[in-house]
Amino acid sequence: MNKLSFLAIATCFAISSCSKLLNEDVRSQITDDYISTEEGFENAVNAGYSFLKAFYGGDEYGASITVFGTDLFTNGFDGGIKYLNTYDANLNPRNAACNAIWNSLYMAINTCNAAINRAPGIGGMDENLKNVRVAECRFLRAEYYFLLVQLFGPVPLKLQETRGIDREATRAPLQAVYDSIIEDLNDAVQTLPVEASDYGRATKPAAEHLLAKVYLTKASSAAKQQDDYDNAAKYAENVINNYNFKLLDDYSKIFEEGAGEKNSEVIWSVQNSKDFLTVGLGNTLHLYFIMKYDDLPGLKRDIQNGRPYARFKPTVFTLQQLFDRQHDGRFEKIFKRVFYCNNPGTFKNNHGETITLNTGDTAIYLSDRKLTADELKRSDSKYSVYNPEEQTERVFPVLNKFLDPERPDMNEMRGSRDFLAMRLSETYLIAAEALMMTGQKDKAVKYINIVRRRAAKTGHTDAETTNNKLAMEITPDQLNIDFILDERGRELLGELTRWFDLVRTGKLIERVKKYNPVAAANIKPYHILRPIPQDQIDRSSTEMEQNEGY
């Protein structure tokens, strides 16, 4: 276990920035006894939420470790942690990404442990409220351990608060870790309310969604049990059938910034704020999916187009094969392929032709197919056109789900978007996968088709709309694990699930080799787990094994 003193954890309580609606209480000094008061306990629970940002958008590590090195994204030109995509020698036990995530998740767990362990001794607090807060911490602890077990396999299982230096670190059996996660979530399901008192707190349906995903993942692990898929389907169907969640009619509306982030499809989200005094890093995902547009003809950096870190480039598979472009409307709704001039003047376009651009003119068009000479008519064109073969690590279509034009200036890294961690469409896909694995393809297809019908392009007439929806439906004979992975890719593209999905389904090596040429050369079977940080092994007084291959 990491050498964490309680005073270090108490500092985390003091600076927690949990959500827009969870009150934040900044203090300069906190004693060990503070958490044993009602006020301190409440702040400890809030602090437990704050660590969610360490994985879900607070920096690039959580995104990089789940988006890179998959079939759907490869690396852009910039950044220092491309090793998570290239699987080269820098993906070793001393890499910064795994070390930062490991430390953050264990600090989060110890924060939750402190609140859970201290709760019985707190007097004068409403018992029902106290029980709900403890259930929130158990939900959070399960979430943090679930991330750890997916990334690293068997990990140290610590369920008591660490109040001094603890150098013992023994990896618990995989079954024990999953048992702890499921026990925490079962308690949360029994205690949490259906709707949170403050938006962003854990709820019963969020715990059930997470339970469904835990069972789905466990079912293909070394800790699998016969009823895992049945349990995954049961909890997913309960979320689908017994609450008021509903898919939005328009897929693009899910990601509208501001009030739109709180919608009928969102089961649970990680909250952020426009208050830059307390937001910390906020949500930085707006940085990483943007191409390097600001050095192209007619363009300069602005707030609307974003600050271009150019980390994650969609693979050719994502851009050319994944979507049914005739009937599926999601590609057009989530990719930005046109940039308009914000830097007027006379330039050479990407084919060496002189062009004059005025503000608002099309400056860049990223084609999804190779255009013919007649289509291009380059002599008349006032902008640069990049055919697919001309798109590079610097120039590529931009995933727009996380763009944040409400930042105060063009260089601001801190974003205010919520991270939509659990959406109903994923619940449908979890149910479908679990049912398929138990041989219930007919029922599984019904859930798949609900998601696909929503994604259908809208025509100009009712008949066209109906035809598009019917064309999106599949039959049981078309359903297999690759189709489910493709559908999860189309629906959840970029939403920090992909590496987990490929590992869970046993498809990481196969699909990376097939669809990600940059990663294909070095990826090995042992890459289904990340390396245990060497610093953790070195600091431990007990022998701690490294994952195979590292």
Image: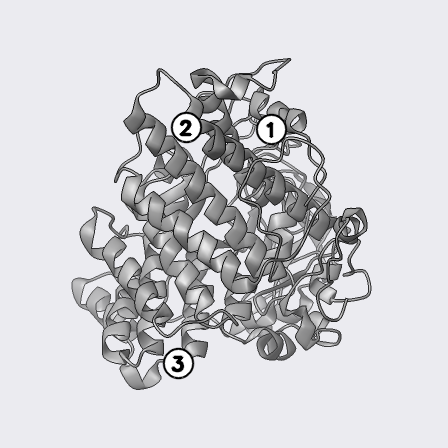
Say which amino acid is labelled 1. Answer: Gly
How many angstroms separate mark 1 from mark 2 (CA)?
31 Å
Q: Which mark is residue 280?
A: 1
Q: Nearer the viewer, residue 364 or 77?
A: 77
Residue 496, horizontal then vertical, whole percent: 53, 54
Say which amino acid is labelled 2. Answer: Pro
Quadrant of residue 57 within the rendered picture: top right
Mark 2 surroundings within 10 Å by alpha-carbon count, few (fewer than 14), some (14 through 19), many (20 or more): few
Say which amino acid is labelled 3. Answer: Asn
Residue matched to label 2 = 120
Q: Earlier in the sequence, mark 1 or mark 2?
A: 2
On-image quarter of the N terminus:
top right
Q: Earlier in the sequence, mark 1 or mark 3?
A: 1
The reply to whether callout 3 and callout 2 are in contact (CB within 8 Å) is: no
Taking the spot 68% from the left edge, 72% from the top edge, the residue there is 526
Q: Is residue 314 above or below residue 344?
A: below
Taking the spot 56% from the left edge, 66% from the top edge, the residue there is 72
Q: Is residue 281 above or below residue 153?
A: above
Residue matched to label 3 = 480
Q: Secondary structure at mark 2?
A: helix
